[in-house]
Image (cartoon, rainbow, N blue to C red):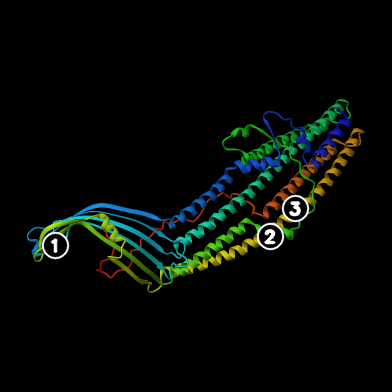
Amino acid sequence: MNRRYVHRRAMSTLAVVVAFFSTTASAQVETGDTLPLTLEDAVRRAVEHNPDLTIVRLGAEVESARVGETRGAFAPVFSTTMGRSSNVTPPTNFLLGDRGVDVNDWFSSTGVRQRLPWGAGTWSVSWDTARTTTNSPLSSFDPSLQSGIQLAFSQPLLRDRRIDAARQQYVIARRNQASSELRFREAAVQTVAAVKQAYWTLKATRANIAVQQRSLELAQELVRQNRIRVDAGQIPPLDLVQAEAEVADRRENVIRAGTTAEDAEDRLRRLIIDPADPSLWRTRIDPIEEPTDRGPLPDVDAAVASALRERYDLARAGHELENAATTVEFLGNQKLPDVRLETSYRGSGLGGTELLRGGGFPGIVTGTRERSFAEALGQAFSPDYPTWSVGLTVSYPLGRSYESASLARAEVERRQLAQRIASLRLEAAESVRRAGRQVRSAAERTDAARAGAALAQERFDAEQRRFEVGLSTTFLVTQAQRDLLQAQVNLLQTTLDYESSLVSFEAVQQAPPLAAGDTVAVRGANIVVLPTPAPRGIFRQGAGGGLQD
């Protein structure tokens, strides 16, 4: 190697840095164990395979399922009862003599009831049948066939009319579903930003290996030249020892740079790997994307306005505030008196074997007459034997109720959320402005580092020429090499900082940065099962008219 070779290697090293890692990309040889990867491909792989992002995506599906759970409160409920009963009672009437009264029933009841999704009213339709046999001498039918149809409706007039527990759950679940979709988009932005950061970091660490390796080659060339001069008696052996020590130090730097690059490669793998296909752990990633030319500095004021309008975390916080307002509305409604309009109508029919009697009371059975079940059913749908009711029920707690205390708590929580949103808006504006300053600072630092690298190259070239003609020392050449290495590493770092700041500035307008140690969490409101009540009308205590069971 001669001076021309050393100068050519030094100039090529600076060219690598100025082109921002382009030499390392072109030097890669595509093999079966190397994956040429563009930035777009890395992002696509992360969106498709990143397990943390999948967790958030599944969280959106969980919230969608919760919406379905809340809709169940408004689904019609079908119920049916079938059974047999026997009741033997001691005689309580002189007509019964010494024998007891034995009553045997076969019965069934079938009905449908539903909570309405508006107004909180509930309706029910029921149909019951029974076949009764008895040994009572007072009975006119044995067996008797009974049938009845009942319609009932219950409507709250104050409490629960505008909003009840079922509608509160449904409204909040819908908003939580929308928030979970926003959370997925937010996580996608954060994941994409992390992938881009990891991609450019890998690119920089690979370029750093090239810089450290070429710095090592310069030190090795200096050792070769010093060995020749020591053998010729031109310089003392101490200069050779000094150059060899520098080679050892730079060889260690190359090893460290390689380890750092492997760590950066694993960080990128972690973000884009398919958990079902671990082969990527054994594949070398070749980041072939090149940075775009630097554009104009961003408009920070416009970015702040965009962030305050479009940030996903602010939109989610807005949904939480709306949920709190819904809770306040619900609890305020629960303080009202519970006034309900209760209505019902029942038609009854009777059939079976009718006992025909003659003579005085209770008479002697002289014959029977069959009345079919169809006749009983027809009577149930006719106005022959109607039973109806209409009325109001009123209930109201005396003293300070649970609802009043809950309302006071909900009001405080709503105000807290309003202040939290105000704080988030300030934080969003600050983070966007900070990211904008980082872009501007990184751009200026890159210009300064590029100028410093060019000056360090000129100084090294001059010191190398002086060394070749005997006007410089090994110490000065080594120092010039160190300065050149540091300037090139600084240029790599500032260029990486600029690319990273662009990624952060773009992401922070849509989502907050993912802090260190943050984990993905799936949360949502628990859905409480709300049984649908069965309205049966309102009757005076002790009076008939209820549905026979």
Q: CA distance from mark 2 to mark 3?
A: 14 Å
Camera-side residue of 62 and 520: 62
Q: Residue at x 63, y 42 (%)?
A: 46
Query: Circle 2 — which element?
Result: helix
Task: Read off the residue under disc 1.
Answer: 138
Task: Read off the residue under disc 2.
Answer: 430
Tell me which amino acid carries mark 2: Glu
Earlier in the chain: of badge 2 and badge 1, it is: 1
In the picture, measured across the screen, residue 87 lies left or right of residue 318, that is: left
In the picture, measured across the screen, residue 544 lies left or right of residue 449, that is: left
Quadrant where the N terminus is found in the figure: top right
Q: Residue at x 64, y 50 (%)?
A: 189
Q: CA distance from mark 1 to mark 3?
A: 100 Å
- Tell me where residue 396 sits by quadrant: bottom left
Quadrant where the C terminus is found in the figure: bottom left
Label drawn at residue 23: none
Tell me which amino acid carries mark 1: Leu
Q: Nearer the viewer, mark 2 or mark 1?
A: 1
In the image, is residue 457 above or below residue 79?
above
In the picture, measured across the screen, residue 537 lies left or right of residue 70, that is: left
Q: CA distance from mark 2 to mark 1?
A: 91 Å
Mark 2 neighbour density, 10 Å: few (under 14) some (14–19) many (20 or more): few
Q: Residue at x 57, y 45 (%)?
A: 54
